[in-house]
Amino acid sequence: MPRLQIDQKLAFGKLKAYVKLDAGVGEAVPVTGDSGHLRRQIENLRQRNDRLSERVERQARELKTLRRKAGGGKSRKEEPRSVFVDGAVLPPHDARPCGPTYRDDALYLRSADHDAKRLVERLGVRPGSSLLDVGCGPGRLAIGLIRQVGEDLDYHGVDVNATWLGWAKSNLTPAHPRYKFTRLDVKSDRYNPSGATLPEDFRFPFADESFDSICLFSVFTHMMPDDVRVYLRDFYRILRPGGRVLATAFLEDGVPEVEENPAGYLGQNWSGPLHCVRYRRSFFNAMIREAGLKIEREDSNVKVSKERDPNETYQRHLYLSKPPGNRESSERV
């Protein structure tokens, strides 16, 4: 009887395996008038097929074991590949916030450049400055700043999402050592539900008066008032006198003080925890003043980036500063 021999060489790192599957293939069975003989031949073929199936399953289990050993005991998943556009390395599509909007590589890079230029023009970010990027994600703004400001910037990005931070630390910091990223393992029902509840005395892991500027793009839009107050208070601590903040938020007049996922707001179907947190403008501005910060400018009906999808929702841009003197004198400004 002829045989079918299947050989396959497999390699997992330094571990190699040679798999041989030797299965019988039956000769053609002539159809005769002897139905008993035909039934016996069919049964033999069925049993042979069962044995072959068992052997294939056994080989599959052995291969799975080899993969686990090669992976240090864990099933290894191929990491998504970074994307290279116009000399810049971008995060994989599935490691970018904002869903389908930012899967367009050219648009993603344009938005990074656009917001970096905004910081240069409005906050005075320049070579030699120190900047804290709160809610930095996988480093979209950092990518723009590398292109617009260069290497001589003390950039620190913080975020609660481990996946985004991991990509930025692995792909941006090695080539740009002054661009650093730190994980904040604090709770966000949207982005880090298993994190620790933000305490009232929370402090960012930076010394007093460490930064010239702080920016938050689409961060307060996903935070409730108690947590916003904690952040604002510590911004006062880590900002240098005269330091500035750019933050975006959903602010309106004539609405409740705070509302999560307001129905039909801006024509969007908000869903899931903290997808949209909208504030009454006067209520939010009062929290800013309570923290000792001064509102220098407020741009209404401005998109987070003009280069984004035309259907992107509108947020207000707030430009804040830390006045010279102590907090008490600042609150009277």
Image (cartoon, rainbow, N blue to C red):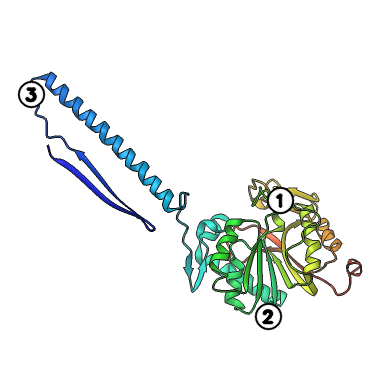
Callout 3 secondary element: loop
Task: Evaluate whether residue 310 shows in this view.
Answer: no
State which tag comes first along the sequence, 3 or 1. 3
Image quadrant where one finds the C terminus: bottom right
State which tag comes first along the sequence, 1 or 2. 2
Instruction: Name the foreground residue: 19 vs 168.
Output: 19
Q: Amino acid at mark 1?
A: Ala
The crowd level at tag 1 (other Cα within 10 Å; few <14, some 14-19, many 20+) is: few
Q: Are marks 2 and 3 in contact (CB under 8 Å)?
A: no
Q: Are marks 3 and 1 in contact (CB under 8 Å)?
A: no
Instruction: Give the residue at x 56% y 55%.
Output: 99
Q: Are marks 1 and 2 in contact (CB under 8 Å)?
A: no
Q: CA distance from mark 1 to mark 2?
A: 34 Å
Q: Amino acid at mark 2?
A: Gly
Residue labelled with disc 2: 128
> Residue 196: which disc?
1
State which tag comes first along the sequence, 2 or 3. 3
Task: Identify the image quadrant of residue 324.
Answer: bottom right
298 relative to 114 in the view: left or right:
right
Q: Amino acid at mark 3?
A: Thr
Image quadrant where one finds the N terminus: top left
- Above-or-below relation of 38 to 76: above
Q: Nearer the viewer, mark 3 or mark 1?
A: 1
Q: CA distance from mark 2 to mark 3?
A: 92 Å
